[in-house]
Amino acid sequence: MDQKSIPQKILEHVQKHAIKGNVSNVIDTIDNFCYKFEREAINVGDEKGKYLDEIVKSCSPKTALEIGAYAGYSALRISRALPADGKLYSIEYNEHHAEVTRKMIQYAGMDNKVTVLCGSSPDVIKSLTVSGFDFVFLDHTKELYKPDLLLLEECNLIHSGSVIAADNIVFPGCPEYLEYVRNSPKYECTTYMSKLEYSDREDGIEKAVYKKQT
Ligand SMILES: C[S@@+](CC[C@H](N)C(=O)[O-])C[C@H]1O[C@@H](n2cnc3c(N)ncnc32)[C@H](O)[C@@H]1O
């Protein structure tokens, strides 16, 4: 029986078949592999990924944060969409996923733009020394989307104009988070409906722009 994790299988496939240092080719190689062999993979995927790219490009972030790295797929998409001097911090609590992500980022030649921080999101957020984030991608434990966003607010790690993108708003869903951002006067929301990764099931991304209260 094959005991390798899905992220490990994705990484090994990339190292064997993708062009080293070519981030777009690495992204396409991951999508093709997952469509053919690993439909259970939980990368944001190519369908929602297009919206993720669009959202990142629209705010041109100098400093970006992602929570939930898995195999590094969304970190590749986000870092590719950043401006030349943009940096992405990616938080991942599973040590194996963090290690796979570091190797994936290095293979794609994006290690000058991405730093993987291994630890649980609330602990890592509290320990961050950066001044704040222009863009945040939430793609980890769905019940933590709202508490982690509140923590980012409390720690002054987001500012007026910061853009928060949340994955899986339909499946598996994040109702408490959506209820908060859609009803708070501090956020202006846009919904991007799409498909769950590598399937025909409905899913989407919620964009929330923070308008800090004075
Ligand atoms: C859906 S996957 C992320 C997929 C990735 N964003 C992509 O699109 O390529 C969720 C990841 O979040 C991690 N995770 C879950 N809860 C977390 C937490 N509280 N802190 C840090 N990482 C967490 C899991 O280990 C898993 O690797």
Image (cartoon, grey):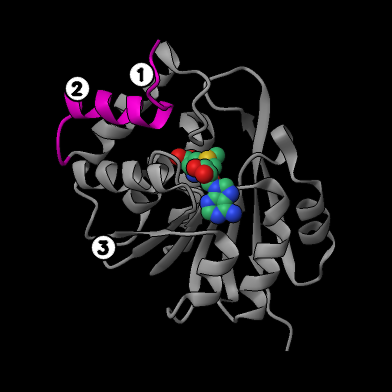
- At 69% across and 51% down in the image, what residue appears? 190
Mark closest to the chain's N terminus, 1 or 2: 2
Residue farthest bottom in this picture: 214
What amino acid is labelled 1 in the image? Answer: Phe
Judging depth in this view, the residue of 104 and 31 nearest the camera is 104
Which of discs 3 and 1 lies nearer the camera? The answer is 1
Residue 160 in the figure: left or right of residue 40: right
Q: Which residue is mark 2?
A: 17
The amino acid type of the residue labelled 3 equals Ala
In the picture, which quadrant includes the N terminus?
top left
Residue shown at the point (39%, 32%) measured from the top left: 7
The relative height of residue 11 versus residue 17 in the rendered view (above or below) is below
| Picture coordinates of residue 44, whole percent (x, y) | 51, 36
Q: Which residue is mark 3?
A: 84
- Specify few, some or many for label 2: CA neighbours under 10 Å numbering under 14, 14-19, or 20 or more: some
Is disc 3 placed on a helix, strand or loop?
loop
Q: CA distance from mark 1 to mark 2?
A: 10 Å
Quadrant, the C terminus: bottom right
Part of the protein shown in magenta:
1-21
According to the image, label 1 marks what residue? 33
| Total residue callouts | 3
Rendered location of residue 27, percent (x, y): 33, 33
The answer to whether marks 1 and 2 mark residues whose Cβ atoms lie closer than 8 Å is: yes
Residue 16 is a magenta residue:
yes
